[in-house]
Amino acid sequence: MDTRHMRYFVALAETLHFGHAAKRMNMSQPPFSRQISAIEKTLCVRLFERNSRNVALTPAGQHFLADCRAVLEGFDAACRDVQLVASGMKGELKLGFMMHAAHSVIPALVRLYSQARPDVRLILEERIPTDIEEMLTEGKLDAAVTFGGGSAPHLRTQLLARDRLCLIVPQGHRLAEAETIGPQSLAGEKLIAAPATVAPTLRTAIGLYCAAGGVIPHFAFEPRLQHTIIRLVQEGLGIALIPQSLCGDLAEGVVSRALDDAPEFDVVLCAPRAARNPAVPQLFEVAERGVD
């Protein structure tokens, strides 16, 4: 037996009339009757009591009707689901993002995408930039929010926002009240920054900014995470140049200051051009409309 036979049985069980059931299944009555007999023969069970006037379900038939309805409902749902998944309307999408993007574009992007695709489960992975690149290449992420500017022809990218470096210092530091802060202001200071192996875009921007003022940066500590950098500045262990998007939610006792000619960098949504997940294109459509 297969689902086709179940549908024959359900049609007759619901109409209790061979002619009406056959019409529902777009068949003439004789072949339909043969199908019902074949079902009973296969199961070795009498499902219907019939005479010249009436058709009625046997107790076994009543039980079989409930089971058939459940099976057909599950089968039909599976068919609908596979079509929805193939069209990107259902399924799951693994989205990676840099920590500081959680303070800027990620909340709006997640909200707008969830509104557009409520049946797609978003799996959010907060990662460092170099991990994001590796995970995209290995297929462990479907898409990611990271720094732009890299030469990766295999990736599709969409600009989400532009961020810039800002300075953070402990409260009471000499630069906390300075009128202007340029690269020369950083001379002799202990800097705290993520290593180039973790956030190459940020580290390069910091190095170039210092070099523009003839300053050789002294990196006293090199933690991987921006939140750790902020905490170390709070403890008075140095100062840091961090994305401006993080400066609106600083720890108590940490002051942010704008930099003269602060380096800017793009924050982009990216995904492999050969992405196989059909839920990805809608993510780019949302990003193209803007996530402000």
Image (spheres, rainbow, N blue to C red):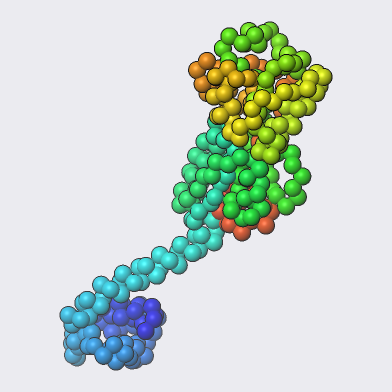
Q: Position of residue 193 (x, y in %)?
A: 65, 28
The N terminus - image quarter: bottom left
Q: Is residue 118 above or below residue 147?
A: below
Task: Tell me what residue is drawn at x 59 percent, y 30 percent.
Answer: 226
Quarter holding residue 32: bottom left
Front position in the image: 68 or 154: 154
Tell me if I can see residue 63 in this picture. Answer: yes
Quarter holding residue 5: bottom left
Front position in the image: 227 or 288: 227
- From the viewer's perspective, is 165 left or right of 248? right
Q: Is residue 67 above or below residue 183?
A: below
Task: Tell me what residue is drawn at x 18 percent, y 90 percent.
Answer: 51
- From the viewer's perspective, is 259 left or right of 227? right
The C terminus - image quarter: top right
Q: Position of residue 185 (x, y in %)?
A: 73, 13
Q: Position of residue 266 (x, y in %)?
A: 69, 34
Q: Is residue 111 above or below residue 168?
A: below
Q: Position of residue 35 (x, y in %)?
A: 34, 88
Q: Is residue 274 above or below residue 51?
A: above
Quarter holding residue 287: top right
Tell me if I can see residue 280 in this picture. Answer: no
Task: Tell me what residue is drawn at x 66 percent, y 17 percent.
Answer: 258
Task: Tell me what residue is drawn at x 51 percent, y 21 percent.
Answer: 251
Q: What count of labels does the image hold?
A: 0
- From the viewer's perspective, is 98 left or right of 252? right
